[in-house]
């Protein structure tokens, strides 16, 4: 019986030691402070609002294509700037699920 308890405790610690992490992949953004990132995000949001307010029907096909590319690049940049998320390791998720199953 004690062997099973030790083995389960070891498995628990092994699962908890595996953690997820977030890393900035763009080397240009590694030294950027939070103030400048929030400023950049507001600039990008205002540009997106400007683009959405434009009359797209009166534009040519090439202009619409460039606007679409610009919107895609803005959204991609905003995703890289918004790195404040909650990361849970796989082991923690498994333990949470097992605890929910056992308790419910």
Image (spheres, helix red, strand yellow):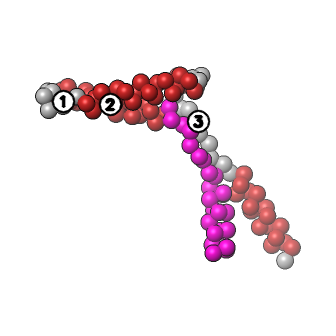
> x, y percentage for residue 44?
40, 27
Instruction: Identify the element where label 2 is drawn.
Output: helix
Report the magenta residues as a range.
Answer: 81-104
Q: Earlier in the sequence, mark 2 or mark 1?
A: 2
Which mark is on residue 23?
A: 3
Circle 3 or circle 2, nearest the eye: 2
Decide: marks 3, 1 in contact (CB < 8 A)? no
Q: Earlier in the sequence, mark 3 or mark 2?
A: 3
> x, y percentage for residue 19?
66, 48
What residue would you read off at disc 1? 55
Marks 3 and 2 sit apart, C-alpha to C-alpha, by 29 Å
Q: Nearest the camera: 47 or 7?
A: 47
Left or right of 20: which side holds 68? left
> x, y percentage for residue 92?
66, 57
Which mark is on residue 66?
A: none
Left or right of 56: which side holds 89? right
């Amino acid at each position: 019986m004690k062997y099973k308890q030790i083995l389960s405790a070891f498995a628990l610690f092994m699962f908890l030691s595996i953690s997820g992490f977030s890393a900035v992949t763009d080397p240009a953004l590694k030294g950027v402070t939070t103030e400048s990132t929030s400023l950049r995000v507001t600039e990008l949001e205002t540009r997106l609002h400007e683009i959405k307010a434009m009359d797209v029907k009166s534009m040519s096909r090439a202009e619409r294509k460039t606007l679409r590319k610009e919107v895609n690049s803005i959204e991609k940049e905003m995703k890289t700037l918004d790195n404040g998320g909650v990361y849970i390791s796989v082991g923690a998720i498994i333990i949470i699920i097992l605890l929910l199953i056992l308790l419910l």
